[in-house]
Image: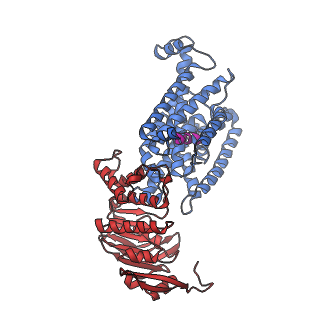
Chain colours: A red, B blue
């Protein structure tokens, strides 16, 4: 499913965090939102996921504003994994995953064979089958994140929104999550929009990078187009060395900060 | 620990619910038997099923039976109200007695009874309006980009203290009309009968049914607002319905038993320690255990120093905490 962000302005209370945001997320692509802390990446993801109403502008899902669909209807095509999520630690992985079936089940308290198959599938794709009876509280950070992703997959989404899915994870777990996201994208054509902090991870897995700064989209395009020294200097105030890895993806190595003392915006 | 783990499976939880049901029935039977006048089994049976006209008949049918049923209803209502509030406010200290929901209902009820006695039949709806307004006020006061648990309790305690002071002042100045002030402020079932049951049963039944129907949504709400929205739950609407349900239950209870505290806070926690946080089990479990707590404490209150009786609120505050602390210590329980 294609998503179009059209002139979105949003914020909290009277404070504007995003101004006139416009870009398109092609169906079946991976788009990553990047930018310095406080630039509105998570806010934008909330607007796309309809958990925050924009002041102006709209998000179109296959040409139709998301506000026109009921929240239950949206939940059957669009799944969200926020940055902060809390579950009672005593839920088992399987029970957490089963919540993903809620938008399809409504009042019916009994899981249908299709529900069960979808849950099994979601656990399988996130490699949580072995851990399905474990309590959330006993899992490591990476396993916990995979359990939550299993829940979103049980929703059978066409679009998946992930807010910093790799934060707090060690480098191996970060890769594991990112590879999993790519696999879901390739195998099932799920459109992914996520917020990441790691530029190299983002460049490696995304079709499109959207760089936000000062409430606006500053640059957007394929990783090779936007991962340039000039762009990174402008957006992140770093002095980067840009290189190309053996497999053709660009990566950057920050070698200095260009932010002058007293110049920072935090 | 293994045995405790077993309780968290679905059959285990159902077994615990069954055991609580049995406990409740036994406590109700014992309560029929014991009181300031001791009665034998045969007298009780005759009174219940054959309408005997000796001394036991009226005692059982018009004093003990309604009082026991009312105690069970009040206990169930307060415990479920507490379980729902704790879930919806994501706060282990949210309980109708603690965050002002009971006091709000109580104040509204007192005003109706003293100032507008011609509307006494609307006592429960009036108390409901008071409870709901208080719950929403407290929630609104605590809201600042999400209701933080600490602000929620602080706002609740402050509002509860103010409303309680209003109630006490009104009652003091109208002591001769109000009857026993003490009864109201600590909670009592003394001298309650079929009239009170008739007044509240429909509200209680409605509230309990709503809590059961909403219990799965409460589970989803517990995952956080964003996740719940992502799963297609209309978060604000669901939250309002849940708060209204909790307010209705607390209001019905306060209308007949006064500010009976403690059961709404502790019963859900005890049930949670035993069978976990799944609200589909927690809600019925709290109902059963809350009913058991009130019925058995009320019976004890009648037995300690007959013919005088101690109000159920005092007995509950004396016996509940040690038991609760014991459970708390023996499980690594995180609310």
Q: Nearer the viewer, residue B305 or A96?
A: A96
Whole-percent x, y for residue B319 in the image: 64, 33
Q: Nearer the viewer, residue A86 or B2?
A: B2
Whole-percent x, y for residue B52 in the image: 50, 12
Does B284 sit above or below residue A88?
above
Whole-percent x, y for residue A214 in the image: 50, 80
Which segment did they paint magenta?
Answer: B265-274
Instruction: Give the residue furthest to the front.
Output: A246
Magenta-drawn stretch contains B269: yes
Does A186 sit above or below residue B183?
below
Please name the residue shown 52% across and 26% down the image. B194
Does B190 sit above or below residue B252?
above
Please name the residue shown 53% across and 72% down the image. A14
Residue B259 at least partly seen: no
What secondary structure predominates along the stretch shown in magenta? helix
Judge from the rendering whether residue B184 lies leftward or rightward of residue A85; answer left or right: right
Does B156 sit above or below residue B172?
below
Whole-percent x, y for residue A174 in the image: 45, 68
Q: Nearer the viewer, residue A102 or A20?
A: A102
Magenta-drawn stretch contains B331: no
Q: How many marks?
A: 0
Instruction: Give the residue furthest to the top.
Output: B54
Residue A4 at least partly seen: yes
Please name the residue shown 30% across and 71% down the image. A28
């Amino acid at each position: 499913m294609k998503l179009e962000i059209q002139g979105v302005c949003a914020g909290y209370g009277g404070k504007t965090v995003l101004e006139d945001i416009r870009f398109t997320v092609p169906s079946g692509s991976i788009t990553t939102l990047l930018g310095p802390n406080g630039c509105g990446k998570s806010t934008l993801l909330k607007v796309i996921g309809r958990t925050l109403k924009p002041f102006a502008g709209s998000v179109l899902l296959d040409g139709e504003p998301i506000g026109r669909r009921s929240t239950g209807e949206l939940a059957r095509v669009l799944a969200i994994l926020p940055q902060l999520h809390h579950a009672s630690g005593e839920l088992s992985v399987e029970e957490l995953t089963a919540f993903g079936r809620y938008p399809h089940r409504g009042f019916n308290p009994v899981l249908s064979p299709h529900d069960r198959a979808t849950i099994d599938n979601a656990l399988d794709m996130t490699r949580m089958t072995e851990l399905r009876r474990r309590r959330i509280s006993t899992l490591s950070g990476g396993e916990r994140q995979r359990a939550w992703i299993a829940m979103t997959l049980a929703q059978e989404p066409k679009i998946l929104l992930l807010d910093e899915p790799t934060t707090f994870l060690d480098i191996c777990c970060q890769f594991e999550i990112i590879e999993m996201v790519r696999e879901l994208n390739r195998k099932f054509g799920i459109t992914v929009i996520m917020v990441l902090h790691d530029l190299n991870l983002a460049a490696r897995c995304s079709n499109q990078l959207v760089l936000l700064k000062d409430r606006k989209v500053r640059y957007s395009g394929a990783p090779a187009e936007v991962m340039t020294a000039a762009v990174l200097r402008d957006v992140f105030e770093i002095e980067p060395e840009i290189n190309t890895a053996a497999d053709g993806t660009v990566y950057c190595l920050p070698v200095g900060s260009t932010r002058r003392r007293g110049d920072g915006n935090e | 620990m293994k045995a405790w783990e077993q309780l968290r499976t679905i059959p285990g939880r159902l077994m615990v619910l069954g055991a609580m049901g049995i406990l409740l029935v036994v406590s109700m039977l014992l309560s029929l038997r014991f009181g300031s006048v001791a009665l034998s089994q045969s007298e009780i049976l005759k009174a219940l099923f054959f309408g005997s006209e000796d001394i036991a008949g009226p005692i059982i049918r018009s004093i003990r039976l309604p009082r026991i049923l009312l105690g069970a209803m009040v206990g169930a209502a307060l415990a479920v109200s507490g379980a729902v509030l704790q879930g919806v406010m994501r706060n282990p200290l949210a309980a109708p007695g603690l965050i002002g929901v009971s006091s709000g209902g109580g104040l509204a009820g007192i005003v109706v009874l003293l100032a507008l006695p011609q509307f006494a039949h609307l006592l429960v709806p009036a108390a409901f309006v008071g409870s709901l307004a208080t719950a929403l006020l407290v929630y609104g006061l605590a809201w600042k980009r999400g209701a933080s648990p600490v602000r929620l309790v602080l706002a609740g305690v402050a509002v509860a203290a103010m409303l309680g002071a209003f109630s006490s002042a009104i009652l003091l100045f109208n002591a001769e009309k109000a009857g026993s002030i003490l009864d109201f402020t600590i909670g009592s079932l003394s001298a309650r009968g079929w009239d009170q049951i008739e007044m509240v049963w429909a509200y209680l039944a409605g509230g309990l049914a709503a809590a059961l129907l909403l219990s799965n949504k409460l589970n989803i709400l517990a995952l956080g607002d964003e996740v719940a929205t992502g799963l297609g739950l209309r978060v604000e609407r669901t939250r309002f319905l849940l708060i209204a349900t909790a307010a209705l239950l607390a209001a019905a209870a306060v209308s007949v038993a006064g500010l009976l505290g403690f059961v709404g806070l502790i019963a859900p926690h005890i049930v949670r320690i035993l069978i976990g946080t799944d609200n589909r089990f927690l809600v019925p479990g709290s109902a059963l255990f809350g009913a058991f707590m009130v019925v058995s404490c009320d019976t004890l209150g009648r037995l300690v120093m007959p013919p005088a009786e101690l109000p159920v609120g005092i007995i509950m505050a004396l016996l509940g905490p040690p038991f609760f602390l014991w459970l708390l210590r023996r499980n690594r329980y995180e609310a």
